[in-house]
Amino acid sequence: MNLSIIFGGISYEHEISIVSAITMAQKLGKNIKITHFIFLDSNHDFYLIESSNMKSKYFSSLAYKQAKKIEIGVGGFYESGFLGKKKMLNTGLLLNLIHGGDGEDGVLSGLFDFYKIAYIGPRLEASILSYNKRLTKLYAKECGVETLPYYVLKRNETCEIPFELPYIIKPTCLGSSIGVCVVEDQTKLSYGLDCAFEFSNEVIMEPFKKGIKEYNLAGTKVNGEFILSLIEEPVKKDLLGFEDKYLDFSRTEEIKNAEITESLTKNLHEAFKKIYNTTFEGALIRCDFFVSSDKIYLNEINPIPGSMANYLFSDFESVLEKIATSLPRKHAININYQYINQIQSAKGK
């Protein structure tokens, strides 16, 4: 199978996306051929990156600006050919590997759908619901999956938090623990809000429970059947920081399954299936769950997980190959101007 990877984007997680793409370059190759690496820079220019240049220094040094620029259009990407004539690249299927803005907020999914480009990744609706943490909680509730109590605060609003200390403050639309702060006493509240509001005009607060269990589960749905990963219990810290998650994205080795009961495994699987439903078809996602007193809470949905959560699957390549056979298709709309023609005919009588 031929696959092209798009990465970068205007996002606070831009560098994480580069790390994920480099990891995929190392991970894939047995049955999947990566034909092109497409880099979206901070000016929204697309660059065609040679596989030999898929190194972090190539991007941090801005050497990528010497690479060939390409353009997006109907059916795919184009490069300039002889006498300025545009030539379509044989990109095959696209893998959306842009974390945060552009990739997970629906910008690229809308663009790909508009230009009829086949891709693995969340569609527009799925992106919107998972990118905004407040919408994620509302969606989970509709799906029958519990979330922790929360309080949403916009910039310059009066803060009236309905639960006791400690609590955690997060920007509404960011991942990788960017702008996240735990407030353990009231004197730290202003600092925590300043940190979060630096990245977003809206923040979300939740009770911060020490000792709570956390489990990660990735998966997809192919032709109506779920493919689920191992269940990971992350190395326990009260709060995983940006560096912990950033370095974690470069993992390629498979992890061991969490040592949990069959009952909890079944319940986590069921919660994941409720969240994935039909909303996330065409994507491989990771759901992060909290478990407290045998009760499961959805923490967040990662619609484009770091390094595609490859380390949670025993045969990651086969999972991507199967997704490629079951991508959602838009219903064709036949526009024939019948209504306008009827009006014109009626006026002509």
Image (tube, grey):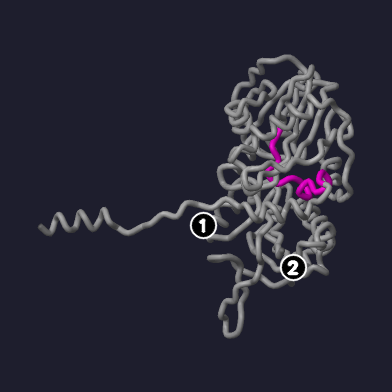
Instruction: Point out the residue furthest to the left here.
Output: 349
Camera-near label (2 vs 1) is: 1
For the magenta stretch, what is the residue range?
Answer: 300-313
Instruction: Point out the residue furthest to the bottom here.
Output: 83
Disc 1 packing (10 Å; few <14; some 14–19; many ≥20): few
Disc 2 packing (10 Å; few <14; some 14–19; many ≥20): some
Choose between 294 and 56: the one closer to the eye: 294
**Residue drawn where x is 80% and y is 59% of the image:** 28
Q: Residue 302 colored magenta?
A: yes
Secondary structure under the numbered disc 2 in the rendered image = strand
Numbered badge on residue 49: 2
The picture quadrant where one finds residue 229 is top right
| Residue 262 percent coordinates (x, y) | 81, 27
Which residue is under mark 1? 114
| Residue 66 percent coordinates (x, y) | 74, 72
Q: Is residue 229 above or below residue 141?
A: below
| Residue 296 percent coordinates (x, y) | 73, 24
| Residue 304 percent coordinates (x, y) | 70, 46
What type is the residue that disc 1 sits on?
Phe
Q: Is residue 165 above or below residue 8?
A: above
What type is the residue that disc 2 sits on?
Ile
Res 101 visible: no
Q: Residue 222 colored magenta?
A: no
Q: Is residue 72 above or below residue 147?
A: below
Secondary structure under the numbered disc 1 in the rendered image = helix
**Residue drawn where x is 67% and y is 20% of the image:** 149
